[in-house]
Image (tube, rainbow, N blue to C red):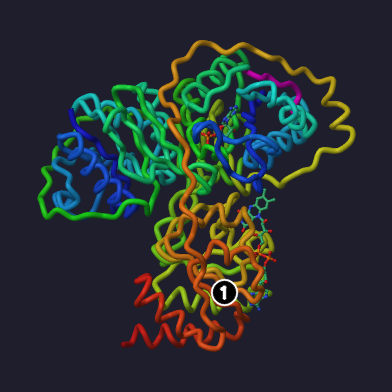
Amino acid sequence: MSVLIFLDQSEGHIKKSSLEAASYGAKVAELLGTTADAIVLGNVAGDLTTLGNYGIKKVHTVKDDTLDHVDAQVFTKIIADAAKAIDARVIIFSNNFNGKAIAPRLSVRLKAGLVSGAVALPDISNSFTVKKNVFSGKAFAHVSISTDIKIISLNPNSYSITTAGDVAEIVAFGATIDMAKVQVTSTDKVVGEIPLSEAEIVVSGGRGLKGPENWAMVTDLAKLLGAATACSRPVADSDWRPHHEHVGQTGLAIAPNLYIAIGISGAIQHLAGVNRSKVIVVINKDPEAPFFKAADYGIVGDAFEVMPKIIEAVKKLKQA
Amino acid sequence: MKILVCISKTPDTTAKIAFADNNTKFAADGVQWIINPYDEWYALVRAIELKEADPSTVIHLVTVGGADCDPIIRKALALGGDEAFRVNGDSPDSFYIASQIAEIAKKGNYDLLFTGKETIDYNGSSIGGMLSELLELPFVSYAAKFDLEGNTAVIVREIEGGEETNKVALPLVVSCQKGMAEQRIPNMKGIMGARSKPLTVIEPVTVDALTAIAAFELPPAKAGVKLVSPDTPEELVRLLHEEAKAI
Ligand SMILES: Cc1cc2nc3c(=O)[nH]c(=O)nc-3n(C[C@H](O)[C@H](O)[C@H](O)COP(=O)(O)OP(=O)(O)OC[C@H]3O[C@@H](n4cnc5c(N)ncnc54)[C@H](O)[C@@H]3O)c2cc1C
Ligand SMILES: Nc1ncnc2c1ncn2[C@@H]1O[C@H](COP(=O)(O)O)[C@@H](O)[C@H]1O
């Protein structure tokens, strides 16, 4: 038996969220007294033996151009076949867009219980129980899996990448690749920006900034901090900012190390998308703004006055 | 064209989250139930728009749950569904729910099956994928735009850091999110009409759940906010660097 981790790539690079899944999977394997294998589909640049660094013993690869686009149905079949071939008892995904498309299908195909949105290592002391996020970050559930094969998809930014300094063995997996029924006609990626779901720091603006012409205070700070930018729903709805920046209940849910909210009231539906952030900073001129209840640090003040000074101070810090 | 829209009930987005029975059950007392926002605003409304474009379209709704789901499903009928099924089974296990929906789907011969991207209570994001595997159909997740060109669906879906345009021949399963449609409010005619639309209660098929919720837990309360004076905002930067070690 072994643990199998699906490593997701984008344009030839293994995603950060997948390296978290690799580190998590390696730890699960250690808990179960076994080893961790990974599967990588499509063409990946660089040396995959370095995945040993994250605790992976063996990397099963299927190099085929058709696998550079993810088709949930095609991927599910290959991963299921690989899982059977190596007798994988626990299969790990990152709970990112691709994980959300593939893991549920695999769950049905292998009749393997799935916990999606895991935030901690499984508890294997008596049954196999995984802590996951529920109620949009407002609570956790401990979910037990009763099947022989178990699937966990790990929320991005909830497990730290660990390094082991080993070298992984690479083996080509002889997969039967089905024809994809979903045809990808175009992809449109925001270039040069850090994807919001992977960012460690996020700077976010709300309606308190009055209009898109004032967004430099958000984007400048983000640039200095190497952060991604986000916004509240009304900001995206008024087209002040692009829709993919909208966080919250109906937008993206994120869990960065640091979330800086400027001119956002902190409505419960906004909090639902950001309350898993490790450190929350709120800048709002209203001392009664609900966001302060969820914050770690705050300034009750006018963003137009305090932000230039904060940006100056960060510049100084970065130069030091 | 026949469309099946999966409708689930969730606590109102502002509901207080608390647990009962030794933290094994959601404390539902006094909670206002709503249609899961993704199911209502995006999946259902887009289906209604497709029917408006082609009036021969038939929209069926399905929910898996107890009789307390009836007001929710009636509201969905008032918005524009033609006929609804409630599978009288109650389980938080995604495989159980997906298997019940698959039974309905197999009988109905649908061209399109819509789900929301996730439920805002269990946050599984699983039912759509499971349903597609049970039915051996293609699955497009996190769709932000959906159009039809004859028998081909043209879908824009979200991927990490961007979007991708997909073309797929019907039938298929699609999970829906923001961008698909705009929220609507049921009108009087819809509400009156919904009363006479068929809502059939079906007993569940036997399915073994693959998972079970052992316990819930609330996150620890925050220690409280540390306020920095607006006169010395640079102090905030120092704290974030030295104390929180976040920058
Ligand atoms: C079902 C449902 C789902 C929703 N989903 C989402 C979601 O996903 N994401 C989301 O964000 N919202 C969502 N909402 C909307 C949410 O309820 C709030 O309306 C929204 O988050 C408010 O956005 P805001 O804080 O930017 O604006 P406002 O509520 O208008 O707040 C602006 C804030 O800026 C402050 N301010 C004003 N001027 C200044 C200044 N000069 N300096 C500093 N501060 C200033 C004000 O004190 C105020 O607190 C949802 C609502 C519903 C009903
Ligand atoms: N009990 C249910 N009955 C019908 N549809 C459901 C049910 N639960 C979830 N769904 C559908 O599946 C989607 C994803 O749910 P989940 O996988 O639980 O996040 C929802 O947005 C609904 O469209």
Q: Quadrant of residue A125?
A: top left
Q: Give the residue displayed 54% in from the left and 68% down from the top.
A: A261
The yes-or-no answer for disc 1 within 8 Å of ligand 1 is yes
Quadrant (top left/top right/bottom left/bottom right) for the N terminus of chain B: top right
| Vertical arrangement, residue A118 with respect to residue A187, above or below | above
Question: Is residue A37 part of the magenta span, yes or no?
Answer: no
What kind of element bears circle 1? strand
A309 or A223: nearer the viewer: A309
Q: Could you tell me residue A223's position as x and y percent?
A: 43, 75
Q: Quadrant of residue B195?
A: top right
Q: Determine whether, in the image, residue A258 is placed left or right of residue B114.
A: left
Residue receiving disc 1? A283
Q: Could you tell me residue A295's position as x and y percent?
A: 52, 65
| Vertical arrangement, residue B85 with respect to residue B188, above or below | above
A316 or A290: nearer the viewer: A290
Q: Tell me the quadrant of ligand 1.
A: bottom right
Q: Give the residue displayed 29% in from the left and 40% down from the top.
A: A6
Q: Could you tell me residue B87's position as x and y percent?
A: 62, 18
Which residue of the protein is positioned furthest toward the front in this rendering? B22
Which chain does the residue under circle 1 lie in?
A: A
| Vertical arrangement, residue A174 with respect to residue A46, above or below | above
Q: Determine whether, in the image, residue A69 is placed left or right of residue A42.
A: right
| Vertical arrangement, residue B203 with respect to residue A222, above or below | above
- Report if residue A58 is visible in the image: yes
Which segment did they paint magenta? Answer: B81-87
Identified by mark 1, the residue type is Ile
Q: Could you tell me residue B214's position as x and y percent?
A: 43, 30
